[in-house]
Amino acid sequence: MVNPMRLYTVAEVKDQAEAVQQLLQTRGVVTELIEIEQLNARFLRQHPELALCVDHAGLWLSANGMKMQPDWMAEIPRLKRASLKSEMIARACQLGEQPHLIDATAGLGHDGLLMASLGAEVTLVERHPILFTLLEFAKQQAEQDAYLAPVMARMHLIFSDAADYLTQRIEQQAITDVVYLDPMFPQRDQHQQAAKKQARVKKQMQLLHLLLPEDGQMDLGDQLLALARQMAKRVVVKRPRHAVFLNDETPDHQWQGDACRFDAYFQLSL
């Protein structure tokens, strides 16, 4: 039997925490609701296990003295600076044509948010119930912001395994403009292993690695690439700059950046 995940909260927002607990239960996640006096940095350091927190700022994932959420509000300055010309992802995904785009590896939703802000109609697909719930809360908060509200109207969340979702679209003969893939755990060649040792892993990625262990619910993306190529006019894969090709398939075109690149696969027959 799997031990329930701890869900910490404070008295002022206990009702919200109880609602979160019930929502997660419907998605197969059992939690133990624990009310504490203060949900602060000291408490998080004293309780380093992977847990969830509900406070006045919403729902968080916490571990090892850190907490994180998909903070879309914090992305506003970047969104205001972004343009179709300045963003490599915009060129790779042809965002100037305002495509319908499926982000099949939603993660924290930051790339999907950027693409929606630049005009795309974005469907974010996420299969992990906790990560999906974090995305839901991020979207609900962003809908209350005057700048982000129009962007949220172009973003749609789907709680599903991406392979199942793409397969369903294929069976329905539903063609989309772009499928975007950014596997969280790409296959590592020697260059990537060296880069990993040198790179400072960001806080958000540390917590996601705890939530999605490499021997568990990671998604290498190989299967997704094969499915996406059957139902999208263009498939764009985000990769570390020196990474091997996804599924060892040579792309039709590449856009190279300093730290990452975008590999594109075109389906001219669709």
Image: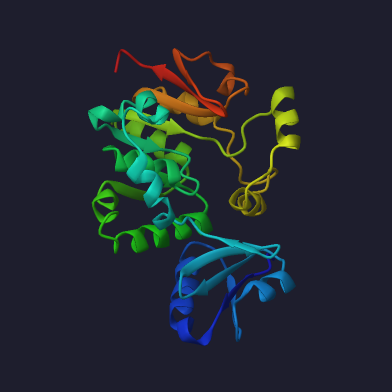
Instruction: Report x, y in % for residue 189.
Output: 70, 24
Task: Answer whether residue 123 is visible to the viewer in this image.
Answer: no
In which quadrant of the rendered image does the C terminus lie?
Answer: top left
Task: Decide if residue 147 is in sight here.
Answer: yes
Residue positioned 35% across, 16% down in the render: 267
Number of marks: 0
Q: Please indicate whether residue 170 sits to the left or right of residue 29 in the image.
A: left
> Where is residue 179 shown, x and y percent of the image?
39, 31
Q: Looking at the image, which residue is at 61% across and 42% down?
A: 218
Residue 121 vertical placement versus 6 (above, below): above
Q: Is residue 26 above or below residue 125?
A: below
Q: Is 221 situated left or right of 135 in this image?
A: right
Looking at the image, residue 170 lies above or below residue 70: above
What is the x, y in percent for residue 248? Answer: 59, 17
Asked whether 110 or 7 is in front, the reply is: 110
Q: Which residue does the image show at 71% across and 31% down from the upper left?
A: 195
Residue 157: image location, x then y, percent: 36, 50
Q: Nearer the viewer, residue 87 or 183?
A: 87
Front-most of 58 and 228? 58
Q: Quadrant of residue 94?
A: top left
